[in-house]
Amino acid sequence: MRLVVIGADAAGATAASQVKRAHEDWDVIMFERGRWTSYAACGFPYFVGGLVSSMDALVARSPQAHEKRGLDVRMRTEVTEIDTKNRRVRFAELDSGKNGTEAYDILVYATGADELRPPIEGLEHCRFLQNPGQAAALHGDIAKARRVVIAGGGYVGIEMAEAAHMLGKEIVLIDAADQLMVSLDPDMAGYVREAIEARGIEVRTASAMTQVSSRPGGGFAVETAAGTIETDLVIAGLGTRPRAGLAADSKIPLGDSGAVAVDHEMRTRTDGVFAAGDCAEAWHLVKKQWVNVPLGTVANKGGRVAGINAAGGRARLPGIVGTAITKFFEWEISRTGLNQREAEELGMEVETAVITAKTTSGYLPGAAPIHVKLLAEAGGRRLVGAQIVGGTGAGKRIDTLATAITAGMTADELIDLDLSYAPPLSPVWDPVQIAARRL
Ligand SMILES: Cc1cc2nc3c(=O)[nH]c(=O)nc-3n(C[C@H](O)[C@H](O)[C@H](O)COP(=O)(O)OP(=O)(O)OC[C@H]3O[C@@H](n4cnc5c(N)ncnc54)[C@H](O)[C@@H]3O)c2cc1C
């Protein structure tokens, strides 16, 4: 049997390794158009910010390490066509210019996502952070810049604001929306904004970037809906879009989200083809919809399930609830389930509660503030969403709430959970339970 995998990062390499572990005698060929395998894109901001010494340090398994485990790794080789009828892929070697084809019995499509590039004049002047090459380029460019504009106040924008601040840059963070972090409700995003401004970073919301032009003497002018900003460097983190074009061209059906449609076993609607990761959909347990959530957590789990099933085993990815976390210096920011806007879009009536407490017993030094917001269905009080912004120890509390939402628990059941307590780690009522009581 021969397995071909397109893409050698979180989803693809996980699937390939899973299959090789199950069937040492199978041919497993992994195509990767880049120069790295199994790299942590999540670590790019910390490499750019100087906390991680090299790109190589972000690599969990190099091409050579994959080869040692028996995988046939084709680096700098792009799959350009998939013939699903005859089960063949066509590929191009990017350095030698040679083309070829390879047959497969089973294919795993794990091509990831591209950065969003809206039609903004001069966007080519911006630096992005979606792949290792871009991270390496930005690492070089940021060293030369004094003033940095970051366009996009989502996860990448916030992490890059922290990185640029650690490097001593003057920073303007802009966003088209009326708030930062649109995955949070405006009240919770307000705490994030306060934390960022407290570090001397200028935040401009309702400031869509409309044009970037280079200045003759060096530097750039960023035109926004609310004025012009002069800068040495523009970093754009405007979102992503599933890299599903090759699948669509090969008649592998896409879902409504624009990502490759899969079932709970990560099978596409094309025989012998699995898909996983940023290029594929996942079932949202609260929305009850197939969605595209481009996160490493989802990609690794999807890759594992695709690999087990491709190897002839049985595994399912029941679904996700959209749990995500980041940090800005001492502030931890996390969310899960639905926010108020998403609930409204689904026509779901929700009740909400927001509390402010401490991460530890208040009498101890180091007790930090924590803000918790809970959303529950009106009436039955089934939990459907949560957001946390707080100091050290706050953010990972979202995992309790993700678990509660996945289990279909109500706010009343959360109050009764036997959660842990010791003064240096928590108040006797954990803040998530204080929020449940308020609700
Ligand atoms: C800056 C940044 C920070 C992030 N932080 C977090 C975080 O904190 N937490 C979190 O959960 N997620 C985070 N993510 C998201 C996470 O990195 C991705 O969800 C994850 O990498 C997706 O894995 P993947 O295998 O689906 O796709 P990718 O990692 O994009 O890998 C796909 C691979 O396929 C290759 N490829 C594409 N097309 C072809 C082709 N035709 N032929 C051959 N090769 C091809 C690409 O070169 C690429 O290497 C972050 C992402 C970025 C960019």
Image (cartoon, grey):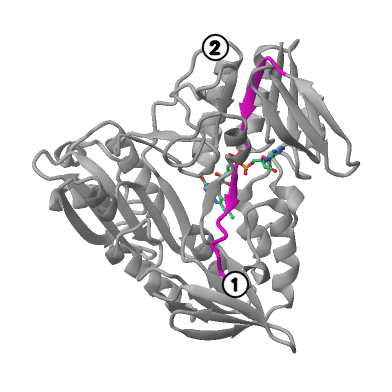
Q: Quadrant of residue 421?
A: top left
Q: Disc 2 to disc 1, how far (Cα)?
A: 50 Å
Classify mark 2: residues with Cα within 10 Å, few (<14), some (14-19) or many (20+): few
Where does residue 24 sit, x and y in percent of width and height? 73, 13
Inspect this view and state whether residue 163 appears.
no
Q: Quadrant of residue 34?
A: top right
How many marks do you count on the picture? 2
Magenta stretch: residue 231 in it? no
- 101 on left or right of 329: right
Q: Which badge, 2 or 1, comes first in the chain's sequence?
A: 1
Q: What's the magenta region?
A: 104-121
Helix, strand or loop at label 2? It is: loop
Residue position marked by numbered label 2 in the rendering: 313
Label 2–label 1 contact, CB within 8 A: no
**Distance from mark 1 CB to nearest ligand 1 atom below 8 Å:** no
Q: In which quarter of the image is residue 354?
A: bottom left
Main secondary-structure element of the magenta-colored stretch: loop
| Picture quarter with the N terminus | top right
Where does residue 181 sit, x and y in percent of width and height? 40, 62
Where does residue 309 sit, x and y in percent of width and height? 55, 16
Amino acid marked by disc 2: Gly
Identify the residue shown where x is 52% and y is 23%: 305
Q: Residue furthest left?
A: 379
- 371 on left or right of 226: left
Q: In this view, does 305 lie above or below 236?
A: above
Please tell me which residue lies in front, 41 or 389.
Answer: 41
- 177 on left or right of 404: right
Classify mark 1: residues with Cα within 10 Å, few (<14), some (14-19) or many (20+): few
Residue position marked by numbered label 1 in the rendering: 121
Inspect this view and state whether residue 85 appears.
yes
Please tell me which residue lies in front, 436 or 387.
Answer: 387
